[in-house]
Amino acid sequence: MISSWRKILLGLAATAALLAPLGMIVRYETVLRLGTPFRFRARFVDPADPFRGRYVQLHFNLTAPLPKAWPYGSKETVYARLGQDEQGFAVIEELSYTPWPPSIPWVEAQLRGFSDYSNRVIHVQVPFSQFYMNQWKAPRAENEYRQLSQKTSYIWCVVRVWRGKGVIEDLYFEERPVREYLEDLSKAPTADAKE
Amino acid sequence: MGLLRFALDTMNRRVLEWLQGEIQSWEREGLLSPEQASWLRRRYHPGECRPLIPLLLSIFGGLLIGLGVVLLLAHNWDQIPRWGRLVVAYLPLMAAIVIAARVVVGSRHVTVAAQESAGLFLFLTMGATLSLVAQSYHIGGSFRHLLLLWMGLALLTIYALDATAPALLYLIGITVWTILQRSEEALPYGYWGLLAALLPYGMMLIRGKDRRAVWLSWGLGTSASVALGFSLQGEGPMPWLLGYLLFFAILMMSFAAPATSESNLSLSPDWAWPLFFLGASGLGGVGWMLAFSSVWEETTASEFWDPDISRFDRVMGALFLFLLVLGAAVTIVKVWRRSDWPIRLGGLFSLLTILLVELHLQYEAPALIVAVVNLFLVGWSAAIVGGAVRRLRTGLLNAGLLLFCALVAARFFDADLSYLVRGIVFVALGVLFLIVNRWMARQRGVS
């Protein structure tokens, strides 16, 4: 009797363990295939997660004008309608309490406090802020970022957005995917070799 | 600890084998009836004593393999395309499921070591697979969301494989989740539901007289003690101190050995000892903190709860305290008849403190209240020492003396007395400790 319910429980545990990651795969693969691509300007640092490995933590510096009669509350969930600036980078056009229709590109986000003293512009944090990289490449990417960020602000990531969810497709350094950029860099002759 | 237990197990086995021979001769000599002999043989069978080392080694092996898989996947093999990595993510999980199925379905004579190592491997590979999928899609979000999903999946594994090592990891996981929830200003109360979901497993171990119940008791008691602090939020220290005081009092009263004429603590079942120990030592520690006047001076009616927390948090904090007061009151009534005075006074102290807090909030008289707390604690330590002397229990005696000395020491640091006076009193306390322990050792020798 005990043995039979343990078999049932193991069956349930195994099914749940197999289905939970599968559900994540289906959800995020759908976003990657059907989502609208947006380029987000990024700054980053390189931390580590005990289970998921090394990643670069992306900061997007997204702000939005606060609508009138907005009740103040930090870390409140909002729905941000996305648009593009003159250079083709993502900006938040409008915030809403309720989700936008599926035809409009929008993401679920969190409010993170006012960005100026007039209390009219607010910082917004989007949930796609981690770009996982190989253990050895993430610190190199951060080093390169430090040098590049002084010369140019064109470090960005492409995010696919679909029905409120966003999935990072790739991170770009000087218009090239970061992996390619780092590989080219390691192949290039060093300054000492040139001399 | 493991080696010590192994040595004890080996010794026990030898003693039990000797006892089997003795029972046979007692039966032959007519000292025991055949029924009595058969009952004693069953009760003290050497087979009941399982060696611990193979079990620990199996758990260690399962843990190493599982952690190795986690680290291999965390390396992030970016040369492999996404779909390839997802397939790789599923391989260890499927291997772990097959091994677990062989343990549960395959053999009739499954060892505890096999259950534990298979359970640990499955537990860790569940986390590794979720992590690799999250890594492949750069799924941000915080670690706490991943942890919650993982612990939810792992719960069934514990029951299916009857494995305690994953249950201990589950307790660590839900405790860390609670801390992360509070640190990110999210609600931590789901912890208590997650903890309750593990209690039937603990009951199963206790009913089956499984010694792994002792491990689980340590885990449950420690985890709940940590999580309680993250379920209460106050401006000053009082909500935490009250919550812990009542919680520890409930643990101590509920899991103390019943007081009979020849009672001693070893009469309580093995699994109850960790909970009793946590309760009694926690109650003494929190009581000692309440004996400082600064704690009461920082407590005012307007600043009892943190003014920045939400109304929901405030209601939940009040609800927790109400349930703990109710729990302590019900427990003291329930155990009063079977308990002795050290236990009764400990329970009464927790309820008395509630009254003192109420009085303090009304009249703000910290000096008087601190005096009452100190007097009560001195009385409690005297009752513990008295009980220990009556039963010749050295551990209990030292616990009572420790509480008394801690109170005296704290008051001496509070008061502005000369080093000479403090020095003399400390020497006197040390001498008292030694004399009473020596006297106790002699009495035990005589008895």
Image (cartoon, coloured by chain):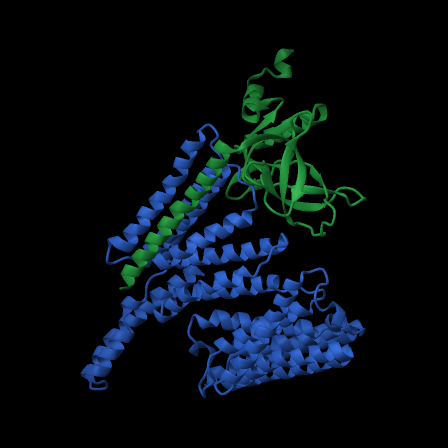
Chain colours: A green, B blue
Q: Quadrant of the N terminus of chain B?
A: bottom left
Tell me how many marks there are. Answer: 0
Specify whether residue B300 is in view: no
Residue at left 34%, top 64%?
B10
Q: Nearer the viewer, residue B288 or A109?
A: A109
Tell me which corner region of the image, top left, top right, bottom left or bottom right, holds residue B303.
bottom right
Task: Check the image and report above or below for A90 versus B427.
Answer: above
Residue B260 at x, y percent in the picture: 45, 86
Residue B185 at x, y percent in the picture: 64, 54
Residue at left 55%, top 42%?
A49
Q: Nearer the viewer, residue B275 or A86?
A: A86
Q: Nearer the viewer, residue A193 or A17?
A: A17
Residue at left 29%, top 63%?
A2
Tell me which corner region of the image, top left, top right, bottom left or bottom right, holds residue B38.
bottom left
Residue B371 at x, y percent in the picture: 73, 81
Specify whether residue B224 is in view: yes
Q: Quadrant of the C terminus of chain B?
A: bottom left
Task: Check the image and report above or below for B440 versus A137.
Answer: below
Residue B86 at x, y percent in the picture: 42, 36
B53 to the left or right of A174: left
B214 to the left or right of A42: left
Furthest residue in direction top, as rendered: A195
B366 to the left or right of B326: right
Task: Check the image and report above or below for A157 versus B171.
Answer: above
